[in-house]
Amino acid sequence: MSEHKLNDSLDTLKKSGVRITPQRHAILEYLISTESHPTADDIYKALESNFPNMSVATVYNNLRVFRNAGLIKELNYGDASSRFDFVTHDHYHIICEKCGTIVDFHYPGLEEVEHLATHVTGFEVGSHRLEVYGTCPACIDNAAKVN
Amino acid sequence: MSEHKLNDSLDTLKKSGVRITPQRHAILEYLISTESHPTADDIYKALESNFPNMSVATVYNNLRVFRNAGLIKELNYGDASSRFDFVTHDHYHIICEKCGTIVDFHYPGLEEVEHLATHVTGFEVGSHRLEVYGTCPACIDNAAKVN
DNA sequence: TAAACTGATGATAATGATTATAAAGTAATA
DNA sequence: TATTACTTTATAATCATTATCATCAGTTTA
Ligand SMILES: [Mn+2]
Ligand SMILES: [Mn+2]
Ligand SMILES: [Zn+2]
Ligand SMILES: [Zn+2]
């Protein structure tokens, strides 16, 4: 796990006057170490053995603190819980509609889309969101086995 | 308003054995006539003068019926209510972060992104979602007036 | 036509993720 | 040490959506 990312994040927080508590340290560490885009409850469950008294509200509160500090992104999918992603380089997500797995992938320029949208709608464009949906290799295999 | 779209939709429903009730007729008609991507509650409020006894559950139930029949799409934004869009041609959305307005816009091929995602991740790709975020002309004007 | 059946509606309760509240704890500061 | 500000925890509240179920309205059958 990247000790470097953790220390950078802790520095960022300290600089903006946020105290580093054991809970915050653990939540950040967990977010940096995982590739799984966990929900607040996933994080809560992952840490409850180390923090038996931690409240789920603490997880939510601190995820908001981290989001406001720009350290993590919140991914919303409407029907289910938000999922959280530690911010490193820009990337997009591909999501399995069977099992919910979210996998990173990289794609270069979609600035063109932003330009066109500006031009056609008169909006001042700030960002965009792109997701690809499908079936992950594991779920494809499972479907094959059943038949 | 497109009488044509309404009749097509009613036919589609009838063919799949769904009864056309006055409530369903009104909800569909409203969705076809508006450009506003309304929430379930927006629809409920818009129709309550004509249907004083209608339940909000009926709106939700019928939106699900229409979605399953492929007549409408549900747009999720996590923090707020789902919004609904009558399906015509494919299009993307640009969303004002100030006031929540959703405006359609068209953009040609993003099949390339789907292909790349397939190649890189091994997923079987089915669809994608693209949204652009920014500030709408009305909100830009308002901000200018204040200063 | 009357009875039976099927699916739709409407009132209300339940669910579940997230947020708000308030008391108690902890660290920083004077 | 006393004060202050911030944080955690437990719990209650919120709010969109769904579930339940009695009632209703067409349609089919006898
Ligand atoms: Mn990611
Ligand atoms: Mn639209
Ligand atoms: Zn899968
Ligand atoms: Zn706006």
Image (spheres, coloured by chain):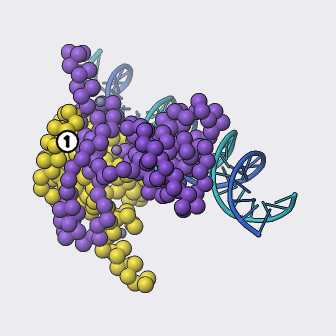
Chain colours: A purple, B yellow, C blue, D cyan
Residue B47 seen in render? no
Ligand 3: quadrant of the figure: top left
Image location of residue A24, percent across then percent down: 56, 46
Please give the residue where the numbered disc 1 appears in the rendered image: B117
Q: Hey, which quadrant is residue A142 in on the image?
A: top left
The chain containing the residue under callout 1 comes to: B
Tell whether A52 sits left or right of A28: right
Image location of residue A95, percent across then percent down: 29, 39
Image location of residue B20, percent across then percent down: 27, 42
Q: Considering depth in this image, is A59 or B27 the residue closer to the camera?
A: A59
Q: Of helix, strand and loop, which one carries label 1?
A: helix
Which amino acid lies under the numbered mark 1 shown in the image of this protein? Ala
Crowd rating for badge 1 (residues with CA inside 10 Å; few <14, some 14–19, many 20+): many
Residue at point 52%, 42% (across, down)? A27
Residue at point 59%, 43% (across, down)? A23
Q: Hey, which quadrant is residue B71 in on the image?
A: top left
Above or below: residue A126 compared with residue A60: below
